[in-house]
Amino acid sequence: MNFKRPLPRALCWSIVERPITLLATIHTGPFGGYQFPPMADALIHGADIAYFEIDPLEKWDIGFMFRPTNSATTLLQEVGPAIYRRLEQELSLNRPLANCAAGGIGDLIELSTPTQMTAGYEMDWGVDRTVCQRYRAQKKEIRFLETSEDQGRAAVSGPLHEIVAELDAWRTTGCLPRADSTQILNAYEAADLPTLARLRSELAPLRPTRILAQLQERESRWLEKIVDIAAEKKSVLIAAGVLHFPGEDGLLSQLSRRDFTVLDIGSQ
Protein backbone atom coordinates (compact mmCIF):
# COMPACT_ATOMS: atom_id res chain seq x y z
CA MET A 1 0.00 0.00 0.00
CA ASN A 2 1.32 3.43 -0.95
CA PHE A 3 1.16 5.87 1.96
CA LYS A 4 2.84 8.69 0.06
CA ARG A 5 1.06 12.03 -0.10
CA PRO A 6 0.53 13.16 -3.71
CA LEU A 7 2.27 16.42 -4.49
CA PRO A 8 0.51 17.94 -7.55
CA ARG A 9 3.51 20.06 -8.36
CA ALA A 10 7.10 19.58 -7.26
CA LEU A 11 9.63 22.36 -6.95
CA CYS A 12 11.82 20.77 -9.57
CA TRP A 13 13.66 22.16 -12.59
CA SER A 14 15.76 20.91 -15.47
CA ILE A 15 18.81 22.66 -16.90
CA VAL A 16 18.12 22.45 -20.62
CA GLU A 17 21.75 22.57 -21.76
CA ARG A 18 22.85 19.64 -19.56
CA PRO A 19 21.27 16.50 -18.02
CA ILE A 20 20.93 18.21 -14.63
CA THR A 21 17.82 18.13 -12.47
CA LEU A 22 17.38 20.59 -9.59
CA LEU A 23 15.17 19.65 -6.63
CA ALA A 24 14.10 21.91 -3.79
CA THR A 25 13.83 19.91 -0.57
CA ILE A 26 12.51 20.32 2.96
CA HIS A 27 13.86 18.53 6.02
CA THR A 28 10.49 17.21 7.23
CA GLY A 29 7.63 15.39 5.54
CA PRO A 30 4.33 13.57 6.14
CA PHE A 31 4.26 9.87 6.99
CA GLY A 32 5.33 7.95 3.88
CA GLY A 33 6.81 11.04 2.23
CA TYR A 34 5.63 12.75 -0.95
CA GLN A 35 4.65 11.31 -4.33
CA PHE A 36 6.00 13.55 -7.08
CA PRO A 37 4.36 13.88 -10.53
CA PRO A 38 5.49 11.01 -12.85
CA MET A 39 8.04 12.76 -15.07
CA ALA A 40 9.49 14.79 -12.22
CA ASP A 41 9.74 11.62 -10.11
CA ALA A 42 11.59 9.81 -12.90
CA LEU A 43 14.12 12.63 -13.24
CA ILE A 44 14.51 13.08 -9.48
CA HIS A 45 15.27 9.42 -8.85
CA GLY A 46 16.81 8.46 -12.18
CA ALA A 47 20.09 10.39 -12.27
CA ASP A 48 23.49 8.70 -12.28
CA ILE A 49 24.83 10.94 -9.49
CA ALA A 50 22.99 12.79 -6.72
CA TYR A 51 24.34 15.86 -4.92
CA PHE A 52 22.91 16.96 -1.55
CA GLU A 53 23.82 19.93 0.65
CA ILE A 54 25.27 17.62 3.30
CA ASP A 55 24.52 14.00 4.15
CA PRO A 56 20.81 13.96 5.13
CA LEU A 57 21.11 10.43 6.52
CA GLU A 58 23.85 11.30 9.01
CA LYS A 59 22.76 11.45 12.63
CA TRP A 60 23.05 15.06 13.79
CA ASP A 61 23.41 16.56 17.22
CA ILE A 62 21.32 19.66 16.52
CA GLY A 63 22.45 21.25 19.78
CA PHE A 64 25.85 21.67 18.17
CA MET A 65 24.94 23.08 14.80
CA PHE A 66 24.14 19.91 12.91
CA ARG A 67 27.43 18.23 13.80
CA PRO A 68 27.61 14.53 12.98
CA THR A 69 27.43 12.57 16.23
CA ASN A 70 30.64 10.74 15.34
CA SER A 71 32.72 13.93 14.99
CA ALA A 72 35.89 13.96 17.04
CA THR A 73 35.20 17.52 18.19
CA THR A 74 32.14 19.69 18.54
CA LEU A 75 31.72 23.01 16.82
CA LEU A 76 31.63 24.55 20.31
CA GLN A 77 35.16 23.30 20.90
CA GLU A 78 36.33 24.58 17.52
CA VAL A 79 34.81 28.03 17.29
CA GLY A 80 33.23 28.75 20.69
CA PRO A 81 36.37 30.25 22.27
CA ALA A 82 36.92 32.50 19.24
CA ILE A 83 33.38 33.87 19.48
CA TYR A 84 33.75 34.38 23.22
CA ARG A 85 36.94 36.38 22.66
CA ARG A 86 35.03 38.57 20.23
CA LEU A 87 32.34 39.12 22.85
CA GLU A 88 34.96 40.01 25.45
CA GLN A 89 36.74 42.40 23.11
CA GLU A 90 33.80 44.09 21.44
CA LEU A 91 31.04 44.28 24.02
CA SER A 92 31.21 47.03 26.62
CA LEU A 93 30.66 46.07 30.25
CA ASN A 94 27.08 47.34 30.32
CA ARG A 95 25.97 45.43 27.24
CA PRO A 96 23.54 42.48 27.67
CA LEU A 97 26.02 39.63 27.33
CA ALA A 98 29.02 41.14 29.08
CA ASN A 99 28.73 38.67 31.96
CA CYS A 100 28.38 35.63 29.72
CA ALA A 101 30.44 32.82 31.25
CA ALA A 102 32.84 30.99 28.97
CA GLY A 103 30.78 27.83 29.23
CA GLY A 104 27.65 29.78 28.37
CA ILE A 105 28.90 30.44 24.87
CA GLY A 106 27.13 27.19 24.03
CA ASP A 107 24.00 29.35 23.79
CA LEU A 108 25.46 30.83 20.63
CA ILE A 109 25.67 27.40 19.12
CA GLU A 110 21.97 26.93 19.82
CA LEU A 111 21.17 29.79 17.46
CA SER A 112 21.06 27.36 14.54
CA THR A 113 18.74 24.84 16.20
CA PRO A 114 15.71 24.36 13.92
CA THR A 115 12.32 25.64 14.94
CA GLN A 116 9.78 23.11 16.20
CA MET A 117 8.42 20.85 13.48
CA THR A 118 4.86 21.10 12.26
CA ALA A 119 2.53 18.49 13.79
CA GLY A 120 2.18 15.39 11.63
CA TYR A 121 5.57 15.85 9.94
CA GLU A 122 8.82 14.10 10.78
CA MET A 123 12.46 14.48 9.77
CA ASP A 124 12.54 10.78 8.82
CA TRP A 125 10.19 11.62 5.92
CA GLY A 126 11.96 14.76 4.81
CA VAL A 127 12.41 15.05 1.04
CA ASP A 128 16.20 15.12 1.31
CA ARG A 129 16.27 11.93 3.40
CA THR A 130 13.78 9.93 1.35
CA VAL A 131 15.45 10.79 -1.96
CA CYS A 132 18.92 10.05 -0.57
CA GLN A 133 17.71 6.72 0.84
CA ARG A 134 16.45 5.70 -2.60
CA TYR A 135 19.79 6.54 -4.23
CA ARG A 136 21.64 4.53 -1.61
CA ALA A 137 19.27 1.60 -2.09
CA GLN A 138 20.05 1.74 -5.82
CA LYS A 139 23.78 1.89 -4.97
CA LYS A 140 24.21 5.05 -7.00
CA GLU A 141 26.90 7.63 -6.43
CA ILE A 142 26.12 10.31 -3.84
CA ARG A 143 28.12 13.50 -3.36
CA PHE A 144 27.73 16.62 -1.25
CA LEU A 145 27.88 20.34 -1.99
CA GLU A 146 29.51 21.20 1.35
CA THR A 147 30.37 19.84 4.78
CA SER A 148 28.60 20.28 8.10
CA GLU A 149 31.67 22.23 9.26
CA ASP A 150 31.14 24.70 6.39
CA GLN A 151 27.56 25.28 7.52
CA GLY A 152 28.43 25.63 11.17
CA ARG A 153 31.24 28.12 10.76
CA ALA A 154 29.15 30.27 8.44
CA ALA A 155 26.26 30.36 10.89
CA VAL A 156 28.30 31.87 13.73
CA SER A 157 30.17 34.48 11.70
CA GLY A 158 29.10 37.96 10.75
CA PRO A 159 28.26 41.27 12.47
CA LEU A 160 28.54 40.79 16.20
CA HIS A 161 25.62 43.10 17.00
CA GLU A 162 23.30 40.84 14.98
CA ILE A 163 24.54 37.69 16.72
CA VAL A 164 24.05 39.40 20.09
CA ALA A 165 20.56 40.67 19.20
CA GLU A 166 19.43 37.18 18.21
CA LEU A 167 21.03 35.60 21.26
CA ASP A 168 19.33 38.11 23.54
CA ALA A 169 15.97 37.26 21.95
CA TRP A 170 16.67 33.56 22.46
CA ARG A 171 17.52 34.04 26.15
CA THR A 172 14.48 36.28 26.71
CA THR A 173 11.75 34.39 24.88
CA GLY A 174 13.11 30.85 24.69
CA CYS A 175 12.75 30.69 20.91
CA LEU A 176 14.33 32.18 17.84
CA PRO A 177 12.71 34.87 15.69
CA ARG A 178 12.86 32.90 12.47
CA ALA A 179 10.61 32.46 9.47
CA ASP A 180 7.64 30.31 10.43
CA SER A 181 8.30 26.66 9.53
CA THR A 182 4.60 26.02 8.90
CA GLN A 183 4.50 28.84 6.35
CA ILE A 184 7.53 27.39 4.61
CA LEU A 185 5.94 23.95 4.56
CA ASN A 186 2.62 25.24 3.20
CA ALA A 187 4.39 27.27 0.49
CA TYR A 188 6.48 24.21 -0.42
CA GLU A 189 3.45 21.98 -0.82
CA ALA A 190 1.74 24.69 -2.91
CA ALA A 191 4.92 25.23 -4.98
CA ASP A 192 4.50 28.95 -4.18
CA LEU A 193 7.83 30.50 -5.19
CA PRO A 194 6.83 34.15 -4.53
CA THR A 195 5.92 33.32 -0.93
CA LEU A 196 9.10 31.29 -0.51
CA ALA A 197 11.13 34.23 -1.83
CA ARG A 198 9.51 36.46 0.80
CA LEU A 199 10.16 33.91 3.55
CA ARG A 200 13.77 33.68 2.43
CA SER A 201 14.15 37.42 3.02
CA GLU A 202 12.52 37.04 6.45
CA LEU A 203 14.50 33.99 7.48
CA ALA A 204 16.22 35.66 10.42
CA PRO A 205 14.91 39.19 11.04
CA LEU A 206 17.46 39.96 13.75
CA ARG A 207 20.38 38.81 11.63
CA PRO A 208 19.39 39.92 8.11
CA THR A 209 22.86 41.06 7.06
CA ARG A 210 24.67 37.87 7.92
CA ILE A 211 22.01 35.26 7.21
CA LEU A 212 21.26 36.52 3.70
CA ALA A 213 24.97 37.02 3.00
CA GLN A 214 25.60 33.50 4.27
CA LEU A 215 22.98 32.07 1.91
CA GLN A 216 24.44 33.99 -1.03
CA GLU A 217 28.01 32.95 -0.21
CA ARG A 218 27.06 29.29 0.02
CA GLU A 219 24.98 29.46 -3.15
CA SER A 220 27.79 31.18 -5.04
CA ARG A 221 30.12 28.32 -4.08
CA TRP A 222 27.50 25.79 -5.15
CA LEU A 223 27.03 27.63 -8.43
CA GLU A 224 30.70 27.16 -9.29
CA LYS A 225 30.32 23.46 -8.50
CA ILE A 226 27.26 23.25 -10.73
CA VAL A 227 29.22 24.86 -13.57
CA ASP A 228 31.90 22.18 -13.11
CA ILE A 229 29.23 19.45 -12.82
CA ALA A 230 27.72 20.65 -16.10
CA ALA A 231 30.91 19.55 -17.84
CA GLU A 232 30.28 15.93 -16.82
CA LYS A 233 28.48 13.63 -19.22
CA LYS A 234 26.50 11.75 -16.58
CA SER A 235 23.00 12.77 -15.50
CA VAL A 236 22.97 14.58 -12.17
CA LEU A 237 20.45 15.46 -9.46
CA ILE A 238 21.21 18.50 -7.30
CA ALA A 239 19.00 18.63 -4.19
CA ALA A 240 19.12 21.60 -1.82
CA GLY A 241 16.88 23.28 0.72
CA VAL A 242 13.87 25.08 -0.72
CA LEU A 243 14.89 28.59 0.40
CA HIS A 244 18.09 28.39 -1.64
CA PHE A 245 16.21 28.57 -4.95
CA PRO A 246 13.81 31.56 -5.06
CA GLY A 247 14.47 35.29 -5.09
CA GLU A 248 16.68 37.62 -7.08
CA ASP A 249 19.84 36.13 -5.56
CA GLY A 250 18.66 32.52 -5.29
CA LEU A 251 20.10 29.66 -7.30
CA LEU A 252 17.52 29.86 -10.09
CA SER A 253 18.32 33.52 -10.79
CA GLN A 254 22.06 32.94 -10.49
CA LEU A 255 21.90 30.09 -13.00
CA SER A 256 19.95 32.24 -15.45
CA ARG A 257 22.57 34.97 -15.16
CA ARG A 258 25.20 32.37 -16.07
CA ASP A 259 23.27 31.66 -19.30
CA PHE A 260 21.74 28.36 -18.21
CA THR A 261 18.15 27.78 -19.29
CA VAL A 262 16.15 26.55 -16.29
CA LEU A 263 12.90 24.79 -17.17
CA ASP A 264 10.15 24.16 -14.60
CA ILE A 265 9.22 20.47 -14.80
CA GLY A 266 7.47 20.19 -11.44
CA SER A 267 3.98 19.52 -12.76
CA GLN A 268 4.97 16.95 -15.40
Image (tube, rainbow, N blue to C red):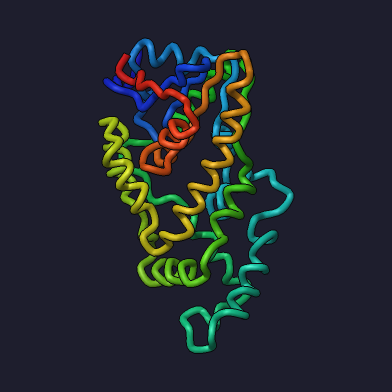
Q: Is residue 167 visible?
A: yes
* The N terminus lies in quadrant: top left
User: Which residue in the rendered view is the most extreme toward the right?
Assistant: 72
Residue 205 drawn at (x, y percent): 36, 60
The relative height of residue 171 versus residue 54 in the rendered view (above or below) is below
Q: Is residue 125 visible?
A: no
Q: Residue at x 39, y 16 (%)?
A: 40
Instruction: State the residue in front, 133 or 266.
Output: 266
Instruction: State the residue in front, 36 or 208.
Output: 208
The relative height of residue 55 versus residue 201 in the rendered view (above or below) is above
The relative height of residue 191 versus residue 84 in the rendered view (above or below) is above
* Residue 209, picture quadrant: bottom left
* Residue 105, picture quadrant: bottom right
The relative height of residue 120 versus residue 211 in the rendered view (above or below) is above
Instruction: State the residue in front, 115 or 249.
Output: 249
Residue 112 drawn at (x, y percent): 49, 55
Q: Residue at x 36, y 27 (%)?
A: 11
Left or right side of 180 for 231: right
Residue 59 drawn at (x, y percent): 58, 39
Instruction: State the residue in front, 92 or 61.
Output: 92
* The C terminus lies in quadrant: top left
Q: Residue at x 36, y 42 (%)?
A: 247
> Total of numbered circles in the picture?
0
